[in-house]
Amino acid sequence: MVNAQTWLNEKFPNQKAKKKVIRLHIYSYSGTENNNGQNCIFFNTKLEGELDLSDFTNLNDCYIGCGSFFCQYSNYHKLNLLKLYNCSKLNDFYISYNDGQLSFRGNSAPNNFYLRYCQNLSDLKFSDQFANTKNLNIRNCQQLTTLSKLDRLVNLNTLYIVDNLKLTTLEGLSELEKLQTFTLCNCSQFDRLTGLDKLISLRTLNISGCPNLDLSQQDIPAGVTSLSISDINGPNFASFSPNQQLRSLSISDCSNLQEISDIDKLTGLSITNCSNLEKINGFEYAAAHFNFQNCPKLKPFKRFGELKELSSLIFPNSTYNFANLKEEIKRLKINDLTPLFRNKSRELKELINNAKSKLSEEAQELPEALLELHMELARDIDNNFLQKHLERIKNSLNKKLSEQEINGLIDKQTEVIKLEKQLENLQQEIQN
């Protein structure tokens, strides 16, 4: 563990050196350092205390974290104060794997601010310093209870709050007049989102893993067009009627929900694992893409006759049985997908081998690294750090491979993964 400011001044001993830096990454995990003055990546460094980045006036991308997907407590930083004066060019700022309360001072803040795995951070206070921040992403801060003065983020467009199990208060939420996308996931202590109805610009709302949240007492903002609800099981959440602007609705794992009404304006509807849902009013009038799974009490719709007709084609001498029809369709689909999956997997392997044949011995691992990062990004699409790492690998490959060859690898992998997942799901459903 080193004093943060002392270490920083040793690495960048004068203002000229600091002004030159565009990208600064500091990892506590082991790795190979790379420092050309503009792009500076350091490993084996655990910072503590105060860190003043005010002289880094051209800094665009800053990451302070671990550098490993499996970070142990011994590799956590212990920063308590970050100063950001005159850092107007700062676009992305990641802070992860930090232990202790953290505060900020200055007259500037990043456009995109990511805070993850900050242990023992209980109250995060914002100020006018964050007036220009567009994207706030906070996840896995297990002791965090309060986000204070959110109203100071007057230009916030996206708010992403995930896996903060003790969080109960979003102070100033109602004043986020420019907020368009709000995700609240696995924050189990919430029973009400005060000010949600005041978010006049909100268009996309995702709420999941908040079992105590009583949506029956919440007014969904009138402008929301896409709504996703999962694992909301308050005792009063027995019925739900979307607003007139809503176009896409997804509801899953809401065991107390019994009735959904007024869905005739929807263009997309997905209902999954709602064990007590019995009635959906307006469905027969909806020109929607729809999906229903594991809703045993849901009454059949008018398409029942079409299902019987389909069953008679597959089982011409048997009476209609939906379970048998479903299983037979799955088997037919598996028989259709299996050879296709084998062929596409073979084609991917051939593309990888062809790419390797054009690369030097030192670069043989790059095609697999490219595909592995692409898979990680598919699971965490908002991760700018992974995106930039992917772009660096692409740039390295571009020296020997064409853009078409690189995109061909990614496209083929995407195709293979989709087929594999589809087969796995079908086979698992048949086994169950």
Image (cartoon, helix red, strand yellow):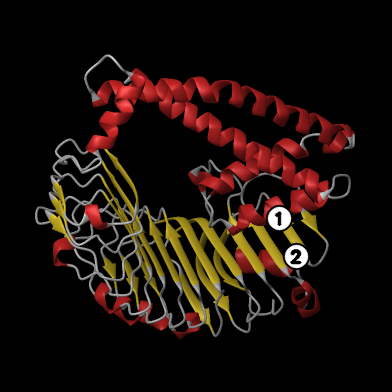
Disc 1 packing (10 Å; few <14; some 14–19; many ≥20): many
Residue closest to the eye, 77 or 38:
38
SS at badge 2: helix
Give the residue type that dot 2 points to: Lys
Residue 55 locus on image (x, y percent): 69, 79
Q: Residue at x 83, y 62 (%)?
A: 36
Residue 296 locus on image (x, y percent): 17, 35
Q: Could you tell me if the residues under marks 2 and 1 are in contact, i.e. CB atoms within 8 Å?
A: yes
Q: Read off the residue under disc 1.
A: 42
Give the residue type that dot 1 points to: Phe
Q: Residue at x 36, y 21 (%)?
A: 314
Label 2 to label 1, Cα distance in Å? Answer: 10 Å
* Count of marks overlaid on the render: 2
Image quadrant containing the C terminus: top left
Q: Nearer the viewer, mark 2 or mark 1?
A: 1
Residue 262 locus on image (x, y percent): 20, 62
Q: Residue at x 43, y 61 (%)?
A: 138
**Quadrant position of residue 148:** bottom left
Above or below, 259 against 155 in this view is above
Disc 2 packing (10 Å; few <14; some 14–19; many ≥20): some
Residue 229 locus on image (x, y percent): 29, 54
Drawn side of residue 120 relative to residue 349, left or right = left
Above or below, 173 against 115 in this view is below
Q: Read off the residue under disc 2.
A: 11
Drawn side of residue 56 relative to residue 272, left or right = right
Is residue 279 shown to the viewer in this render?
yes
**Mark number, residue 165:** none
Closer to the chain start, of discs 2 and 1, is 2
Image quadrant containing the N terminus: bottom right
Residue closest to the eye, 389 or 124:
389
SS at badge 1: strand
